[in-house]
Amino acid sequence: MNTVTEKVPTEDGILNFYRFAQDDPTGEEAMATAQEPNGLYGAAASREAEGEQPPSPTDLSELLKEGTKLSHEKAENTKFVKEFLKGRIKRELFKLATAALYYTYSALEEELDRNKENPAITPLYFPQELHRAENLKKDVEYFYGENWEDTIQCSEATQAYVDRIHHLGRHKPELLVAHAYTRYMGDLSGGQVLKKVAQRALQLPSTGEGTQFYMFDNVTNAQQFKQLYRARLNTLELDDEGKKDIVEEANKAFQFNMQVFEELDKIGATIPDEPQDGAVPVHDGKGDLRKCPYYAAKGAAASGCPLHAAMALTSRPEVKALLAAFATAIAATIAWYLM
């Protein structure tokens, strides 16, 4: 099993993975670093919010925030999310989760495209900024190869989620708002933290291969974009019953996600632990020394981490010179032997 030492902001022991309706400083900073104050949608968000009163309890964004709090907490505390955020994610399980996301977003975006002229969908239709299916296609190809379409399968829990999305797209498209809001805004809030965890835990390339899902190249400022999205939510012409239906559907969206997580947990229990490359666990020398895989129970306080001690030793000039001379001697011996 791959483990990493990763500092992740916690509240009640877990990152606010889905708490997109509230500020998530870590996720926002990761998305907004080096961005202009008024990014691509910053000005638009400011214009739409200018002169408006603080959110009303009857606004759809506020109703969603308050009406899904319990679901937020349950989703945050699922075993899969907790283990992921601790860096305890098996590569095979991460691959299966990526495939599940591919099927989910393919269904959602197919229905959003089909219903983009619907008055409830049009204000929230941002295909260039939010759509994930194409990015996920790159991720599954990275993990499964060119023939990925013949390799991956839609799991039972994911299929139930997909079926629900297609049913709504054909019969109650306005309720797609609940699924779009739940998925996209959550990804914008916590996705950048999850990307870093996955890259370190699974030793994925820093250039983004395998984690394209978390990259929103056309969103220059996540916080401002979310403000715009919530403002658009509040402009939808819905009566009280319509708003209630969307909140109820958002809770169902959380349930579908949790069912996928539970399914992944069951599968994960059958997958053998996966050692790091070279069987060397990741340890960055920070945090609690006792978590170092090379920590010795006795005398640890005096000796520290043997791995880092060895690395420090090899950085000394005299040791470097000795190693260089040794390497030269070995090279000469090999050259002589091959002559």
Image (cartoon, helix red, strand yellow):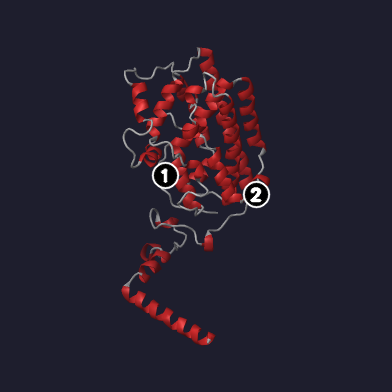
Q: Quadrant of residue 189?
A: top left
How many numbered circles are shown? 2
Position of residue 95 in the picture relative to residue 201 (left or right): right
Percent across and percent down for residue 252 are 58, 27
Estimate the x, y position of residue 289 in percent, counting from the top left.
40, 57
Residue under the image location 48 percent in, 34 percent down: 128
Crowd band around label 1 with a 10 angstrom C-alpha radius: few (<14), some (14–19), many (20+): some
Give how far across and how far down residue 261 sits, in percent: 58, 39
Q: Dividing the image into 4 quarters, which one contains the N terminus?
A: bottom right
Q: Is residue 234 visible?
A: yes
Mark 1 element type: loop
Residue 192: which disc?
none
On screen, residue 62 above or below 129: above
The residue to which callout 2 is attached is 147
For residue 3, side relative to residue 47 (left or right): right
Q: Residues within 10 Å of mark 2 (few under 14, many from 20)?
A: few
- Above or below residue 336? Residue 117 is above
Q: Residue 265, how many percent across, how many down? A: 60, 43
CA–CA distance in space, label 1 to label 2: 36 Å
The image shows residue 282, relative to residue 75, as above or below, that is below
Question: What residue appears at the point 38 percent right and 55 percent down from the top-left corner?
Answer: 286
Residue that carries the numbered disc 1 in the rendered image = 8
Which amino acid type is shown beneath numbered disc 2? Asn
Q: Nearer the viewer, mark 1 or mark 2?
A: 2
Task: Report whether residue 17 is seen.
Answer: no
Asked whether, in this view, residue 318 is left or right of residue 185, the answer is: left
Q: Amino acid at mark 1?
A: Val
The one nearer the camera, 110 or 179, is: 110
What residue sits 37% from the left and 62% below the top? 301
